[in-house]
Image (cartoon, rainbow, N blue to C red):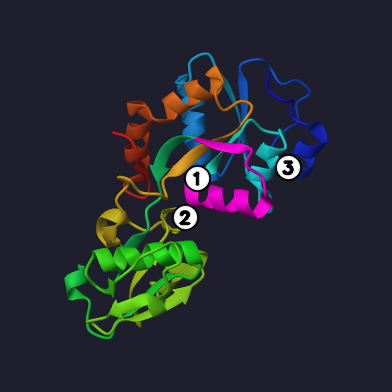
Amino acid sequence: MFKRLAAAVVCVLALSACSSEHKENTLTLVASPEPHARILNYIADEGLAEGVELDVKVIQGGIDPNHVTANGDADANFFQHDPYLQEWSEENDDHSLRSVAAVHLEPLTVFSTSVDSLEQLPAGATVTIPNDPVNRARALSLLAENNLIEIDERSAETAVEDITANPRDLTITLVDARLLPQTLEDKDVAVSVINGNFALEAGLNYEEDSLAGEDPDNNPYVNILVAWQDVADSPQVKALATALQSPEVAEFIRNNYHGAVLPAQH
């Protein structure tokens, strides 16, 4: 039913040990390590995708999981949100991938090691945010939602220049998203808006250091399960989608990520 993994491709990608057989009722997925592959492995260990065996390949650097999936070398992937998928589809003129389940949000979160609340943020304070367009727009929107700045019209391309009011005269500095946790060590930085996965990797404490974060409800940046169009409606993919949106997975996310990852359901 599903395309067999091309052994040479898998070896080149160094996803895992190669297999010459792709069993019926087995889904092969490519996923980033945290939290995606960990969630999938939890589902596999608990047998939550009834009747389906999951073959999870962890993404290594330089691999484009959408290309791997679109080429039929994997049945599905789990690493992205819908805006990223749509941008990838347009840039590559490839619309063979479909979103089949909204699973979790890795929220942009405001962190600080110098103030205990946003109300304490002093005038003229420096705020660091991601420099890539998508996360920059998300960060500015989050600051606006918390009344630190005003933006008349928000969009996926919102930039610092679109700020219409800055009552506290904040200095907003753009930084590579991976480096944002390090900016909290700078005494001149009051707060930083950090992606959930990078905050997780840096060991930031959500209970002690987070001041505000994105809401998963109706959030376009919720991470999704994406499947190759020929298998998107298969019973196997539907079973995995049901498992990913189950109360068990929601509880697993809450218990293991403590705010760094938020379930989209329940």
Tell me: residue 153, above or below residue 42.
below
Residue with the mark numbered 3: 14
Q: Are marks 1 and 2 in contact (CB under 8 Å)?
A: yes
Residue located at (32% from left, 27% from top): 247
Residue 250 location in percent, x, y? Answer: 34, 34
How packed mark 2 is, by other alpha carbons closer than 10 Å (few <14, some 14-19, many 20 or more), is few
Residue 176 placement, left or right of 75: left
Residue 204 located within the stretch drawn in magenta: no
Q: Residues within 10 Å of mark 1 (few under 14, many from 20)?
A: some
Circle 3: residue type: Ala
Who's the residue at 55% across and 47% down the image? 85
Are circles 3 and 2 on residues that touch, CB within 8 Å?
Answer: no
Along the line of sight, the residue nearer the viewer: 48 or 172: 172
Q: Give whichever of discs 3 and 2 has the lower sequence position.
A: 3
Q: Three-letter amino acid code at disc 1?
A: Glu
Quadrant of res 65: top right
81 in the magenta segment: yes
Residue 67, image x and y in percent?
69, 44
Q: Secondary structure at mark 2?
A: helix
| Residue 222 left/right relative to 190 | right
Q: CA distance from mark 1 to mark 3?
A: 18 Å
- The residue tagged 1 is 34
Dividing the image into 4 quarters, which one contains the N terminus? top right
SS class, disc 3: loop
Relative depth, front residue between 181 and 243: 243
Q: CA distance from mark 1 to mark 2?
A: 9 Å
Label 2: which residue? 201
- The answer to whether residue 104 is visible is yes
* Amino acid bearing label 2: Glu
The part of the chain drawn in magenta is 80-99
